[in-house]
Amino acid sequence: MFIESVKMNLKSQLEYKASFIMSSISQFFVFFTYYFVIIALFNRFSNIKGYTVYEVLLCFAIIHLGFAFNETFFRGIDKFELLIIDGSLDRFLVRPRGILYQVLCSKIHAIKVFRILQSVIVMAIALIKLDVIWNIEKVIVLILMILASILIFFGLFVLTASYCFITVQGLEVKNVFTDGGKNLAQYPISIYRKGFAFIFTFIIPYAFINYYPLLFFLDRTNNILYMFSPLLVFVFLIPCLLSFKIGLKHYNSTGS
């Protein structure tokens, strides 16, 4: 069903080819604005708390890849409030499929796939410039970092969707944790003050994506626990999914 949903959404968006092309170009330039900001920063400073430009770009690419993946394929949950406002959620409730699965299939933003490709390109450049000595542990930790990046933003999207059961107003707060978190986590967490580092380690576990496993990948530590630290993101998913389940249980139909 999900693959069919991707095909249908892509087909509908390609009906307006000029709009699709112009939007794709804008996405290209918006993404590389972030990239050039980092490059400009390192033209002024040789490193940031011991991290070189390509080490930061690796962190940047992993975080942006996870965010772009969610914006591309999980756009339905990101715009969950619209389903409540127009009553579409009521139709999902009478179907035999799971609600969250239907919401994920409801909308695909194909244009954002270019951001995924750009993140992969930046990651490839960073890995080449870092001259990584590859082994099976490095491959595993890189895959875990990418997977954890996707999952943490998925969890945040589900968490903010749960907030919509309480109110569909003032949802700008979700940008603090999604867009804001993305911009913060594109740098290693250790560069921030202790208060920020604590929040984005033990409350929203960005540090287990872009700091501890990064230390292992860059051979700054040989602690095997750092290698598998991205798996802790699965723990973060539990309260996110639970909050959505609780919100859905107390949802009052619009009567549509």
Image (spheres, helix red, strand yellow):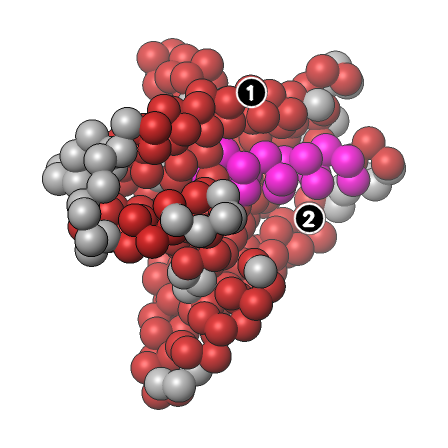
Q: Is residue 141 magenta?
A: yes
Q: Which residue matches tag 1? A: 235
Q: Label 2 amino acid?
A: Leu
Asked whether the viewer can see residue 136, the reply is yes
Q: Where does the image place residue 5, in percent across and percent down from the top left?
A: 51, 65
Q: Give how far apart the Cα atoms at labels 2 and 1 are.
A: 29 Å
Residue reaching furthest left?
Answer: 169
Q: Is residue 204 above or below residue 85?
A: above
Q: Label 1 amino acid?
A: Val
Q: Where does the image place residue 81, in percent across and percent down from the top left?
A: 25, 46
Q: Quadrant of residue 15?
A: bottom left
Q: Where does the image place residue 176, in percent across and percent down from the top left?
A: 27, 34
Which residues fall within the magenta stretch?
139-153
Q: Horizontally, is 242 left or right of 140 in the view? A: left
Q: Which residue matches tag 2? A: 127
Asked whether the viewer can see residue 50, the reply is no
Q: Horizontally, is 20 left or right of 211 in the view? A: left
Q: Horizontally, is 24 left or right of 5 in the view? A: left
Q: Is residue 50 above or below residue 255?
A: above
Classed neighbour count for the residue bearing mark 2: other residues with Cα under 10 Å, few (<14), some (14–19), many (≥20): some
Circle nearer the viewer, 2 or 1: 1
Give the secondary structure at mark 2.
Answer: helix
